[in-house]
Image (cartoon, coloured by chain):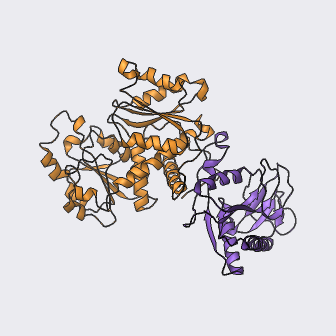
Chain colours: A orange, B purple
Amino acid sequence: MTVQPDATGIGLRHLLSTEGLRREQAEALLDTAASMEQALTGRAVRKLPTLRGRTVVTLFYENSTRTRVSFEVAGKWMSADTINVSASGSSVGKGESLRDTASTLAAAGADAIVVRHPASGAPHRIAGWLDRVGHSHTDGHVAVVNAGDGTHEHPTQALLDAATLRRRLGADLTGRRVAIVGDVLHSRVARSNAHLLATLGAEVTLVAPPTLLPAGVDAWPVTVTHDLDAHLATGPDAVMMLRVQAERMHGGFFPSAREYAVRFGLSARRADTLPDHAVVLHPGPAVRGMEIASAVADSDRAAISEQVTAGVHVRMAVLYHLLAGEDSR
Amino acid sequence: MPTRRRGGPVPNGASNAEGERELLSPADLARTVARIAHEILEKTAESGAPVVLLGLPTRGIHLARRLAERITAIDADATVAVGTVDPTLYRDDLRRQPTRPLAETDIPAGGIDDVIVVLVDDVLMSGRTVRAALDALRDHGRPRAVQLAVLVDRGHRELPIRADYVGKNVPTNRAEDVVVSLSECDGADGVAIR
């Protein structure tokens, strides 16, 4: 683990995307996440006083279990006050605009707002508005964390995937080969991972049918293939299976669920062709029998519950870097 | 938090070009560690409780390991475990400076319940690091007792904290730096003031 006694913060004001995150920033976040895990392992009391008196609001316009719980647990374990706001049950239902909701939360004393929104770019807009307005009782700065925006990015998911890979494969991911398989088109997880893993030095390959690849994928730091079996035969170090997002499918992207599962699902037979050390990741919630076979999801190779645990430590690290020091203000 | 900028060891005796004055030579440092090891044995023996040495990052970790080696060299039957505790997340000055990186925390497998914990650090000044470490310990368990061993006590306490084992008491003014060098991380042993 790298520890620089004279380091002076990592210069993070918001966490809106992994695109544009510098390697040293990403590694500092991942190192901090590993330290958080160490600090909490085997303890009688899982509570740190670090963010006492800080308020973290989660503002979710889309359903979520793991991401929201994970942020809430992360905040609570560091003694922040965490408050959950969902679109249903708030003034959003009365027609309040995103901008007004955000400034209300800031004016009510939020130090950080964790946003999930169906529109790509919503967290970025909120950060822009709040940076311009400023709020006296929070010293003018409210940190915004993107917890998933449309089909754009989900940076903390990518960070927890990278943290899981570092646990399994070692802290340096340089030259590690990671395949991201499935519905890349609708996946903010894929985009965030492609950028983050490339920044960390890994070689990323997208495996998907042409209909499920976004326009502009040529500009991503990845290679693209349409043949899962051929790619698995090259022995990747990790395979990340994406959920088929039925709720975002408004057209015929593939002929049938069965054909998709046959061509792009990770069956037990396919998983057996992987090298022994290879890790299988899934951001969850998994559709068993569709993109991943039950036997694979439950195997030792799969790191699905490790990912959830890493998620708490990664989100603690993000809140720590955004809220603990003076440069966050 | 005392400033502890690193520098190479100074030649024995007088000040070097940077105005650095030697407080402990490598041989002095080895003797000091040996003496503290004896004192820890003497002071903890009668209770019969196991001893856990917990180093505070960075140089306290190396000092704790050296002390444990000396203690087992003196008394092969002594039960001494070594670990580290990073007090950063418990500091009271987090919001006064840029975000600090975290260091290693490694509590020995047996835990710290009902043992004698000896916190080990290189320089004791304000006492704030030790206070943070005491708070961290509280969340890890309930030791029978907590003691403090430091290589240098330079004064300027801001909290009612004192060390049980002191290598050397050094009156300093606040503008001075006490520089502890250990071969594990600085290439050579020595303590200097500048």
Q: Is residue B140 left or right of residue A150?
A: right
> Along the line of sight, which residue is nearer the eye, B57 or A212?
B57
Judge whether residue A21 can be spotted in this image.
no
List x then y, in percent, for residue B105: 58, 59
Relative to B106, is A186 above or below? Answer: above
The residue at 38%/22% (across/down) is A92
Relative to B65, is A250 above or below? Answer: above
Count of numbered badges drawn on the protein: 0
Q: In this view, does B181 lie to the left or right of B136?
A: right
Judge whether residue B161 can be spotted in this image.
yes
List x then y, in percent, for residue A186: 27, 38
> Along the line of sight, which residue is nearer the eye, B169 or A72?
A72
Q: Quadrant location of the C terminus of chain A? A: top right
Q: In which quarter of the image is residue B177?
A: bottom right
List x then y, in percent, for residue A93: 35, 21
The outermost residue toward the top is A95
Relative to B188, is A284 above or below? Answer: above
Relative to B49, is A35 above or below? Answer: above
Q: Quadrant location of the N terminus of chain A? A: bottom right
List x then y, in percent, for residue A232: 24, 59
Q: In this view, does A195 lie to the left or right of B177?
A: left
> Along the line of sight, which residue is nearer the eye, A11 or A53?
A53
The residue at 46%/40% (across/down) is A72
